[in-house]
Amino acid sequence: MLALSDKHGEVMASVPGLADMARLTLEETEVALEVLEGPDKYSRTPDNEGRRLDRIEGGWHVLNHAKHRRMASLDERRELNAARQRRWYQKHQKQPEPNALHNVSSRSVTQPSDIAEAEADSRSILPKEKIDLNQHTIQTFLSGRLLANWAVSADLLTVLSGINGEPAKAFHLDALSKLKPYHARTEVVVGDRGDGRSGRVDLVIRDEKGEIGIELDCASPKGKSLFKLQNHFDRWCILLRRVVELDKNRVPTTDAAKKVAHLFSRKLTTPWSENEISAFKAIGQIDLEDLDTVERYYQQERAKGKDGIHRRDLKTFLNNFNGEVDRANLALKRKKSSGVADSKFEAAKLALPGLDQDEWTNGSRRLEAYWDEQQAGENGHERH
């Protein structure tokens, strides 16, 4: 009946209708309703003498409906929060630093307040973004469009060089068509894609030496593509739909831009995206002292690990730069004030044995006398 009730906990139904929905006889339904309408001294909800139902015109009112609705809402929020936390944790695994030829842009995700549940359920996740090819033994062909862990034969290289198409679907269909002589199979299931779940490899072909796994990526190889291929195939390659040329005009050149890049562990040879450049220019003149303040604050917050409060995405940081400066100044000011207050408390404890935090906070006669004595001493120093 909880499932049938509306938001007010009312169930509009008849006894025969309930019996039909519950697949019970009329007699069984009437007995069940009598139990639910009657008092129950063992009920965990003592309101209404433990009764669950109350008859109203046209049906029943579920008396403990609000309680169950709150419980269901809490469970739903927990599930949604856990799912969001897992997504955040997976996307913020430490990623390898990209080299100059493969620009990796971070993605902005709101940090949850607690990711303990996500940590408990997390698996070994490989970065889903582009990867640093310097960390892997990979040969490049076709002006960087083809990356492989073996010396690709001339015949296969010729076939792969002719594969083109936009968008991705057309590129996949063209690859499948031109690789048919190699007994191409598409969407081949593999045991692990890098997060403990089964995944799929775009293409698997066969030559006289055995199978070759092929992943079709956009402009730069993805970490999960590399993981699937390395763990399931002796020979493999990644074919890129296009190669993006490095634009040297998009690397940081000013002192402020270099400081920002350093703040987010960006190499000075790593180009910024157009959105990042636009956000940086929109700030206008940047005071390097402000950046120093933010850097000190970020060092302080990053030392807290996952509980630290700071921006994790460069573009989001630039879009909220003035707010980050204000927050850094306020946080560092509070820390300094807290340090002064702590030192005064320690000095008072030496002069007033037994002084505790409650007396310090709420005050007392001897504490007032202590302050008067301190003030008199300060005034005496000023006269001299």
Image (spheres, rainbow, N blue to C red):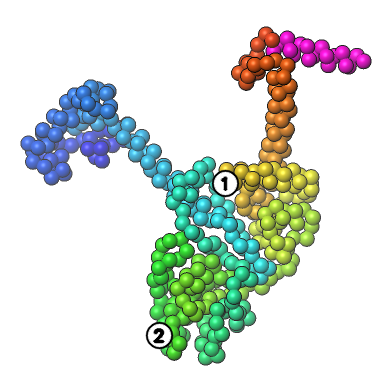
Identify the magenta region: 367-384
121 lies above or below 195: above
Q: Position of residue 136 (x, y in %)?
A: 59, 72
Quadrant location of the N terminus?
top left
Question: Of the residues under marks 1 and 2, which one precedes in the sequence?
Answer: 2
| Rendered position, 203 above or below 288 | below
Residue identified by numbered label 1:
306
Q: Quadrant of residue 241?
A: bottom right
Where is 134 relative to 329, above or below?
below
Tell me where residue 198 appears, x and y as whole percent: 40, 65
In the picture of the structure, the residue carrying the numbered disc 2 is: 183
Q: Is residue 1 magenta?
A: no
**Residue plotted at (54% across, 62% down):** 127
* Image x and y of residue 87, in percent: 49, 53
Quarter of the image where the C terminus is located: top right
Whether residue 57 is visible? no
Left or right: residue 324 compared with residue 109: right
Answer yes or no: is residue 336 visible: yes
Q: Amino acid at mark 2?
A: His
